[in-house]
Amino acid sequence: MRDFTPELLELIRLASTDLPPDVQSSLEQAREREAAGSAARGALESILENVALARRNSTPICQDTGTPIFHVRHPAGWSGRALRGQIRSAVAEATALAYLRPNAVESLTGANSGDNLGDEAFPTIVLEEAEDDELSVDLMLKGGGCENVGAQYALPHGELGAGRDLEGVRKVVLDAVFRAQGEGCAPGILGVAIGGDRGSGYAASKQALLRPLDDRNPQPELACFEERLVEEGNQLGIGPMGFGGATTVLGAKVAGLHRLPASYFVSVSYMCWAHRRRRMVVRGEEVTYS
Amino acid sequence: MRKLTLPLDPVVVRDLHVGEPVALSGVMVTGRDAAHKWMVEVLIRRTRPPQGADEEIHAALRKLLDGGAIYHCGPVVAGLETREYRFAAAGPTTSIREEPYQADVMRHFNLRAVIGKGGMGAKTLAACGEVPGVYLHAIGGAATLIAQTVKRVLGVHKLEFGVPEAMWVIEVEDFPAVVTMDAHGASLHAEVLAKSKAALERLLTS
């Protein structure tokens, strides 16, 4: 296993400065749906201008480069510890190059480490052994504004009249979008996990956000459900930046997890419009990014 | 788009209304979570004693913020090693976290513009009426675009808070924002909240 630090640095640069095409296209469609001269349309125009500028200048799309979340699948026999070390080196280097803002703050003292390296959980690195001999690294940069508006519900939820079924899930997810208003930088993308426990639910809701915006859930019932969440989320009328408008939600990705008989959690992770996720795949000597 | 020059005249502030796009030029100061907590506890309510250069910074902030603007922003700053600071990315952060502090800060410093994203609540809206002041909404995430309007970094206070939390003194030219809370008690955020609440109730019962 060789040193992938330079390739990982490029993955971070891409994620921070170059918005994926599916997200950009979704924002362009959203712009066309807003009335000419409206604050909502103005917001989306600025957003798209910023995306183009960040790509051209190789500077961060958003100053909150968030928690770097890495999902790594590596061939059998590779050292997870070495990969973790390479990722951490690349993160520190990317911070020194101003692709990332120093974001790791020690909670008790308030001290910022200055290089984005905190404890073992910062940055987040999930390692998994692959069945083939390919290395893939998915990276998502998830900012604090949208992370703060994430929510977890335990069903049944009396106040919202939400029972333990998809209809109940629909109600609490819409409540989460309502509560977020524009604070998570709408229009957002919803990662939803049904089931699991409090920890695995949130983790799965974030992992669901790694799916491309334009894919379709392989489970037909969930595919329809995702479409309904987007349509009804938009009926809330919160709009880009919370200015009011046609697009509040760009997409919804739903995953189901096994749960305990006593528990029925719905975990919602809200991703801002600046959905910075990139993938790197290494096959032999070849490295590709998408 | 209306061009505004900092510091703001109260007559100009009262003439601003919700929905109006503006372009700001002049000197402003960034401040977010740690800065607001520090300003209120150490400089305003004095529940914690000042430390180090706190009093000198207080005097400097009084001049900078009088009639001026505070920007809820934690920038990406290049040139940290040489202290030749440049803003690489500088979009707004979510303002509502400063709601417990903002009104006191506005009154204490005679602050006439609060810039951020997501809007603020009733206490800040009331202070906008009194000071008078406005809340200006910048486009969240438009960090490279906004950084281009930052012409110079004039200095930095409280860098011990870390780069995102420090109080950066910046000179901007045509910084774009929209008035979403004005000195007449109007708030676009309260309006959108009420409309979306009605829509949610319809969807929950359908």
Image (tube, helix red, strand yellow):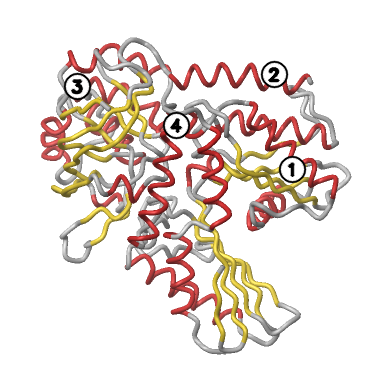
> What amino acid type is highlighted by mark number 4?
Gly
Q: CA distance from mark 4 to mark 1?
A: 26 Å
Q: Quadrant of the C terminus of chain A?
A: bottom right
* Callout 3 secondary element: loop
Chain designation of label 4? B
**Mark 1 lies on residue:** A226
Q: Secondary structure at mark 4?
A: loop
Mark 4 and mark 3 residues within 8 Å of each other at the beta carbon? no
The residue to which callout 3 is attached is B110
Q: Which mark is residue B5?
A: none
Asked if the residue at tag 2 contacts the one at tag 1, i.e. Cβ–Cβ closer than 8 Å, the answer is no
**Are callouts 3 and 2 both on one chain?**
yes
The correct choice, above or below, for A119 with respect to B102 in the image is: below
Q: SS for tag 2?
A: helix
- Choose the circle earlier in sequence order: 4 or 3: 3
Residue type at the position of mark 2? Glu
Q: Position of residue B203 (x, y in %)?
A: 73, 23
Picture quarter containing residue B1? top left
Residue B191 percent location from the top left of the image: 49, 16
Disc 2/disc 4 C-alpha distance (Å): 22 Å
Residue closest to the eye, A40 or A3: A40
Is B50 placed left or right of A195 in the picture?
A: left
